[in-house]
Image (tube, rainbow, N blue to C red):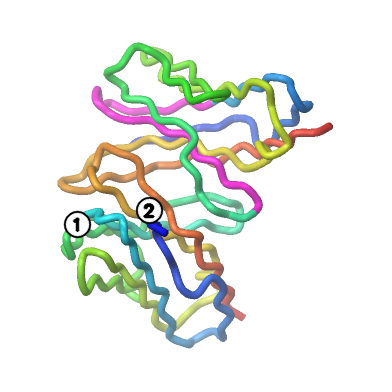
């Protein structure tokens, strides 16, 4: 199936730990994104990469470090997790900046 | 900075009826794109409909249509013949371009419940 996939779908961890969320798209898109959806369902962009190059960084704490090994993958690594990092994280991709973004299924991160 | 406002946190509609979700936005740009996304309980974000600001004609997609009023910066979504499967959060989104990437700015969402 052609899609944007994320692993894991659920992640429960303790404060202070380091964790990663992986994202892969097989749509052949050049641009990938990370969004955060908080407990009130508000969605906000975090990062965007185009062909492995960082394009958008929306003043996200530097504990969050995206890594793009190739244009089909954009992983999100989070250091020293805090309670406020609990959220659903969505990966997305698009072929052309003017066209729609296709979203992955989301990863629900719970920090205890 | 662009802002997107959805003034209806929750709405309810009976099956087979029509419902309109409102969205207003603020921007100084002239060329942009607007979207409605649906998020059912499965939490998957699904594109419902897309509108280019330079097009005067309102977009339609089967039972979904928009009323795009560029001067008023309004972009409402009309769902006709509502179905139980339409129950979801609906997000209005404004797209701006930054170099080779685009950024979606979302509204706070409207939770739509379709009832029997």
Give how far across and how far down residue A111 sits, in percent: 57, 77
Residue B98, quarter of picture: top left
B52 above or below A96? above
Q: Quadrant of the C terminus of chain B?
A: top right
Task: Give the camera-side residue of A85 and A47.
Answer: A47
Task: Give the camera-side residue of B13 and A35.
Answer: B13
Question: Would you say the residues marked 1 and 2 are in contact, meaning their CB atoms lie under 8 Å apart?
Answer: no
Q: Which residues are magenta?
A: B23-41
Residue at 30 percent across and 71 percent down: it is: A66
Residue A61, quarter of picture: bottom left
Give how far across and how far down residue A34 sits, in percent: 37, 60
Residue at 50 percent across and 49 percent down: it is: B45
Give a yes or no on whether discs 1 and 2 share a subunit. Answer: yes
Dot 1 or dot 2: first in sequence order is 2
Secondary structure under badge 2? Answer: strand
Work out which residue is located at the far right of the displayed protein and give it.
B116
Give how far across and how far down residue B97 sits, in percent: 23, 40
What distance separates the C-alpha of mark 1 from that of mark 2?
A: 15 Å
Work out which residue is located at the far front of the displayed protein and give it.
A1
B114 above or below B56? below
Residue at 51 percent across and 77 percent down: it is: A82
A10 above or below B86? below
- Describe residue A91's horizontal placement relative to residue B11 as left or right: left
B63 above or below A35? above
Disc 1: which residue = A50
Disc 2: which residue = A45
Dot 2: chain letter: A
Q: Report if residue B30 lies within the magenta region.
A: yes
Secondary structure under badge 1? Answer: strand
Give how far across and how far down residue B62 sits, in percent: 53, 24
């Amino acid at each position: 199936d052609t899609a944007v996939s994320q692993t894991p779908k659920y992640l429960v961890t303790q404060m202070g730990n380091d964790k990663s969320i992986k994202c892969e798209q097989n749509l052949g898109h050049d641009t990938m994104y990370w969004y955060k959806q908080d407990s009130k369902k508000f969605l906000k962009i975090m990062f965007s990469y185009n062909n492995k190059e960082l394009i958008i960084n929306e003043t996200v704490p530097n504990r969050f470090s995206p890594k793009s090994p190739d244009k089909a993958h954009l992983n999100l690594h989070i250091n020293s997790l805090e309670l406020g990092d609990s959220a659903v994280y969505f990966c997305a991709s698009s072929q052309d900046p003017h066209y729609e973004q296709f979203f992955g299924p989301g990863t629900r991160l719970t920090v205890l | 900075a662009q802002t997107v406002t959805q003034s209806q946190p929750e709405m309810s509609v009976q099956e087979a009826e029509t419902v309109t979700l409102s969205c207003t936005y603020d921007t100084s740009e002239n060329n942009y794109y607007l979207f409605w996304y649906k998020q059912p309980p499965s939490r998957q974000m699904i594109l419902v409909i897309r509108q280019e600001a330079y097009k005067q004609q309102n977009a339609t997609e089967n039972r979904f249509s928009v009323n795009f009023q560029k001067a008023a910066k309004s972009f409402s979504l009309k769902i006709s013949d509502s179905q139980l499967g339409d129950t979801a959060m609906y997000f209005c989104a404004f797209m701006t371009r930054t170099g080779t990437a685009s950024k979606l700015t979302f509204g706070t969402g409207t939770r739509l419940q379709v009832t029997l």
